[in-house]
């Protein structure tokens, strides 16, 4: 559609790309290489929002014509960020810490508009794991699924069998909170048109 800027996903995440395709949106992938080190005293929500904004701004500087979408997701337990496991043993240990408990997933999204303005926000979902044994954790890790995922599990895969309940938005857990995405698009002047982006007129939609 004429007048609609191209959409660029500033992420190499196959899951974010999968859910943008689910929304039937056309997009390009242009990953951002930034320092993702947690700053001293930075809380998890501020961390994911800052990283999302930095990723979006980094790619938007190279694609000033585009709408650039970026995200970052962390698993948080007792105020501590659980990142990706360093190996299988680390993944098993992390899963046993999560077993039988409720943790929070924080997903930050940022949308950089042509001209450089960046909109952003954070979505939170609580995930409760059922109790399970070390043998269950070991067998799950042996599938290979948790080794590249924050918190050592993937709710969109066989890791869903470890989950007892969730409170909040499922898509926050997989890294693309769709309600937040729709909000940011609207703030930027765009309505989701079920497969395309539609400019919001003076009276809204």
Image (cartoon, grey):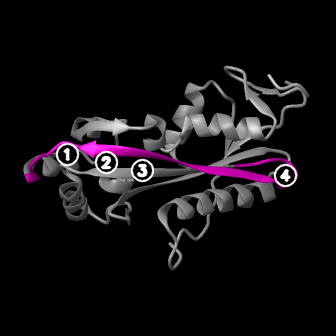
Identify the residue position indicated by label 3 in the image.
Answer: 105
Upstream in sequence: badge 2 or badge 3: 3
Q: Secondary structure at mark 1?
A: helix
Name the quadrant containing residue 94: bottom left
Upstream in sequence: badge 2 or badge 4: 4
Q: Secondary structure at mark 3?
A: strand
Which is nearer the eye, 67 or 165? 165
Q: Which residues are magenta?
A: 111-134
Q: CA distance from mark 2 to mark 3?
A: 12 Å
Q: Secondary structure at mark 4?
A: loop
Whether residue 52 appears in this view of the structure is yes
Upstream in sequence: badge 3 or badge 4: 4
In the picture shown, does residue 54 fall above or below 73? Answer: below
Residues under numbered marks 1 and 3 in contact, where contact means CB atoms less than 8 Å apart: no
Mark 1 crowd level (few <14, some 14–19, many ≥20, 10 Å Cα): many
Which is nearer the eye, 115 or 89? 115
Q: CA distance from mark 3 to mark 4?
A: 31 Å
Q: Which mark identifies residue 64?
A: 4
Q: CA distance from mark 1 to mark 3?
A: 20 Å
Identify the residue position indicated by label 2 in the image.
Answer: 153
Residue 95 location in percent, x, y? 22, 54
Whether residue 10 appears in this view of the structure is no
Identify the residue position indicated by label 1 in the image.
Answer: 140
* Residue 89 colored in magenta in the image: no
Residue furthest to the top in view is 194
Upstream in sequence: badge 1 or badge 3: 3
Question: Which callout, 3 or 4, points to the residue nearer the camera?
Answer: 3
In the picture shown, does residue 81 fall above or below 60? Answer: below
Residues under numbered marks 2 and 3 in contact, where contact means CB atoms less than 8 Å apart: no
Direction from residue 49 to residue 192 in the image, left or right:
right
């Amino acid at each position: 559609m004429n007048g609609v800027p191209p959409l660029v996903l500033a992420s190499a995440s196959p899951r974010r790309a999968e859910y943008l395709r689910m929304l039937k949106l056309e997009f390009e992938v242009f990953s951002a290489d930034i320092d993702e080190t947690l700053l001293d005293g930075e809380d998890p929500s501020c961390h994911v929002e800052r990283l999302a904004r930095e990723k979006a701004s980094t790619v938007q500087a190279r694609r000033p014509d585009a709408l650039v979408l970026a995200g970052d997701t962390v698993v948080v337990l007792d105020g501590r960020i659980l990142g990706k496991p360093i190996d299988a043993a680390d993944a098993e240990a992390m899963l046993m810490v999560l077993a039988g408990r409720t943790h929070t997933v924080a997903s930050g999204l940022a949308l950089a508009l042509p001209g450089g303005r960046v909109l952003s926000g954070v979505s939170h979902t609580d995930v409760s794991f059922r109790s399970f044994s070390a043998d269950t954790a070991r067998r799950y890790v042996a599938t290979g699924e948790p080794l590249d995922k924050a918190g050592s599990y993937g709710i969109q895969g066989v890791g869903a069998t470890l989950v007892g309940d969730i409170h909040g938005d499922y898509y926050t857990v997989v890294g693309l909170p769709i309600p937040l995405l729709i909000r940011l698009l609207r703030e930027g002047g765009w309505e989701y048109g079920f497969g395309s982006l539609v400019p919001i007129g003076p009276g809204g939609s």
